Each structure stands twice: as structure tokens, then as C-alpha cells.
């Protein structure tokens, strides 16, 4: 009998730094990064652009542990940023700042990216949220990756936080992926038969000098290049701490549910990536407002109904992992709207008071600052 994985979780988030006066993006002063690193050590680091900062939780056994660590990380970054008249926002795109005005961090890794990816990487003014789930056996990691891919559009739909780009409403709930998908080696993961197949595929590119290692594989879901984990990379970053924890709990419990089926010689049906990608697009375009395709039923199902089905699917696993309350918080996201919907509502409310479009976009940033601090 296969021993159960630990299903530990780790959460990585990227934030944008904004000036508290102009509300435009601002570079992180060296003193800010130094202060954060003194308090958080290697749990905080610069990102590709100077206006970004990245954090990562410790390895956590439960979502409750992750809550404590993530709150500490978010609070510390906010406290040190305020000392420089800055504030972090946890949204995947800034509502109005221009990518052409940003500079990238002067580190060897990022200088190499700039050279390798040229003009494509300069537009990477985007932030994401990654969730790691501990799966010890490499082949099981790949087996679960194949099945979990079906649920990536569902998680994306719930996470959307990037409706604006360079001062324009894009009409999309998640504009981040339209930028990120310009990079190579992105999108839904291909179906793999084993961890060995994954390693051979990566080695083919490494041996040719195309990539240095598996960290340059940027699929929506991948075996981590650093840890014995399955790493979900599909989600927009969340302005609200509790919504980030809901998405982490959903990732963890779905993974356990699929493992539970697997050890009973059952499995989730694996659909062609062509079909899964259609749901990915629907999530990217509409968020939770237009529903996703249920390929088994052959119909488009409202997200509220899909959410109830998911809660029922993972209830047993959430009980074991002590995260049922967080999973059920999916209903709160649907009730109050994704961040994309809330940002649009903030913009509309500001316009209704007579603000210009530029002023209303600043109001959206204020809204994002407030949401970041709401659960701290």
C-alpha cells in the first residue's frame, strides 16, 4: 500500500510596490529590500522588475499554519514599504502604470532572462501566486499533474485579479495570462507517463543549452524544480489574504482527492489539452461570471454549481486536512465577486462620483491597498 503523501503546502506570492502619493508603480529601494531580508531572511526576494517583491511561506502542514506565516510576511513587507512611502498591492496587473517605464533587477539570473527572452520579457509587469503541495513519490507527482490539470481553469476563474492594463479595461478578468503566455514553455502541462519522461524531456533542452534546468519550464502546473512538490502556477495573486488561503486549500484538497482515487485504482478522466484550454480561456475572459464547460455532461455549467460540486468532491479530504472552512470560502468569492469584479466596481463607483478616468484608476489602486491590509 502506497504511504500517503504529507500534502504539505507552501505559498509563493509576488507583489507590486506603489507610491502612496501618485499610486503609480515605484522601484523598491535597496534599504527596503535589506530591511525585509533582515526580518524574513530567504522568505523574501527581489523579482524580475524593480517594482516587484516576492515572498514564500515556510513548508506548512495545514492551511492554518500557512495563514499565520503569510500574514506575517504580508505585514512585514507592508510595514517596511510604508517607511519609504510605498505600499504593496497583491494584484496581477497594475491598473494604469506602463511596462515601458519599468526597469529590471540587476541580478545575473534576470540579466540572462532579459537577454534570452528579449522584448517579450520586458512586458512581464505581472504577478502570480504559486501553491506547492508535497508529494514524495516522483511518479505519483506526474500522475496527479495529469489529472489535476482539469481543475486549473476552475482555480483560475476564482482567482482573477487583472482586468486593467496600462489604464484600459481589457474586458478580460485575467489579463496576466495574455502577457505570460508570450513566454516559451507556458500553458497547460502536457500529459506525461512518468517522472522519467519529464526528466528526459527537460534533459533534451538542457543538453542543447536551451535552458539551464527545469525552473525554466513555466507550465500552469509542474513538478517543482527545487522541492518534492507539485506546483500550481495558474492563479492570479489575491488582494485578500483569506482568498489566497482558499485557493491554497482548494489546490491541496483537490490533490489529495485525486490521490485518494488513485490508490483505489480510480482516476479522474484526462481530457485533451485542447478542451482544457477552452475552459482556461473562458476563465481568463469571464472569471466566474459565465461558467465553464463540464465535458462529462456536455454543457456549460454556472460557476456556483461547479463550486458546490467541488466542495462535495473534496469534503472528505478537507476534513482530514482541517481546511473545510477555507474550501467553503469559495462561496464568499462567488458572493462578493473576484478581485477583477471588485476592481471594476471600485472604478465604476469612482466615476459615478465625478472622478475622471485617471482619478478612478487611482481609486482602484487605493481599493487594492485597502484589501491587502484588510486581513492583516
Image (tube, grey):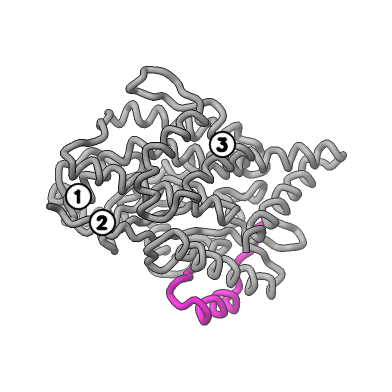
Residue 363 in the image, given as x and y percentages of width and height: 75, 49
* Mark sitting on residue 140: 1
Tell me the quarter of the picture where residue 84 sits: bottom right
Image position of 355 (left or right of 196): right
Position of residue 254 relative to residue 44, above or below, is: above
The residue identified by callout 3 is 173
Which dot, 2 or 3, sits closer to the camera?
Answer: 2
Q: Range of the magenta residues?
A: 24-45
Q: CB atoms at circles 2 and 3 under 8 Å apart?
A: no
> In terms of depth relative to the viewer, which is nearer, 264 or 213?
264
* Residue name at image x 71 percent, y 51 percent: 367
What element does badge 3 sit on? loop
**What residue is pinned by disc 2?**
135
Q: Nearer the viewer, residue 347 or 216?
A: 347
For mark 1, give the secondary structure.
helix
Mark before the other along the chain sequence, 2 or 3: 2
Which residue is found at the position 25% from the left and 46% from the top? Answer: 259
Q: Position of residue 203 (x, y in %)?
A: 17, 54
Nearer to me, 25 or 227: 227
Mark 3 is surrounded, within 10 Å at the Cα level, by few (under 14), some (14 to 19) or many (20 or more) other residues, namely many
Amino acid at each position: 500500500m502506497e504511504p500517503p503523501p504529507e500534502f504539505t503546502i507552501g505559498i509563493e506570492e509576488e507583489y507590486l510596490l506603489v507610491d502612496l502619493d501618485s499610486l503609480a508603480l515605484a522601484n523598491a529601494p535597496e534599504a527596503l529590500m535589506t530591511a525585509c531580508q533582515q526580518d524574513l531572511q530567504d522568505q523574501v526576494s527581489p523579482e524580475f522588475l524593480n517594482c516587484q517583491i516576492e515572498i514564500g511561506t515556510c513548508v506548512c502542514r495545514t492551511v492554518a499554519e500557512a495563514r499565520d506565516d503569510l500574514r506575517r510576511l504580508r505585514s512585514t513587507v507592508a510595514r517596511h514599504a510604508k517607511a519609504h512611502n510605498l505600499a504593496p498591492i497583491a494584484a496581477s496587473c497594475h491598473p494604469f502604470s506602463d511596462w515601458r517605464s519599468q526597469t529590471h533587477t540587476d541580478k545575473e539570473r534576470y540579466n540572462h532572462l532579459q537577454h534570452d527572452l528579449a522584448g517579450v520579457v520586458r512586458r512581464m509587469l505581472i504577478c502570480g501566486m504559486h501553491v506547492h503541495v508535497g508529494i514524495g513519490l516522483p511518479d505519483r507527482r506526474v500522475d496527479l499533474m495529469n489529472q489535476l490539470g482539469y481543475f486549473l481553469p476552475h482555480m483560475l476563474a476564482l482567482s482573477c485579479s487583472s482586468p486593467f492594463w496600462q489604464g484600459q479595461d481589457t474586458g478580460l478578468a485575467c489579463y496576466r495570462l495574455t502577457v505570460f503566455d508570450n513566454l516559451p514553455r507556458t500553458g497547460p502541462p502536457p500529459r506525461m507517463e512518468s517522472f522519467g519522461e519529464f526528466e528526459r524531456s527537460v534533459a533534451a533542452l538542457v543538453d542543447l543549452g536551451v535552458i539551464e534546468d527545469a525552473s525554466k519550464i513555466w507550465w500552469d502546473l509542474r513538478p517543482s524544480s527545487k522541492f518534492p512538490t507539485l506546483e500550481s502556477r495558474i492563479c492570479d495573486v489575491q488582494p485578500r489574504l483569506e482568498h489566497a488561503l482558499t485557493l491554497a486549500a482548494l489546490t491541496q484538497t483537490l490533490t489529495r482527492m485525486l490521490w485518494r482515487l488513485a490508490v483505489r485504482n480510480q482516476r479522474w478522466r484526462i481530457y485533451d489539452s485542447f478542451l482544457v484550454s477552452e475552459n482556461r480561456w473562458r476563465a481568463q475572459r469571464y472569471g466566474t461570471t459565465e461558467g465553464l464547460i463540464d465535458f462529462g455532461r456536455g454543457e456549460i455549467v454556472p460557476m456556483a454549481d461547479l463550486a458546490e460540486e467541488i466542495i462535495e468532491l473534496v469534503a472528505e479530504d478537507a476534513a482530514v486536512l482541517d481546511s473545510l472552512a477555507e474550501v467553503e470560502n469559495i462561496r464568499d468569492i462567488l458572493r462578493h465577486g473576484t478581485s477583477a469584479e471588485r476592481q471594476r466596481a471600485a472604478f465604476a463607483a469612482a466615476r459615478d462620483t465625478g472622478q475622471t478616468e485617471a482619478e478612478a484608476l487611482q481609486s482602484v489602486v487605493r481599493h487594492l491597498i485597502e484589501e491587502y491590509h484588510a486581513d492583516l
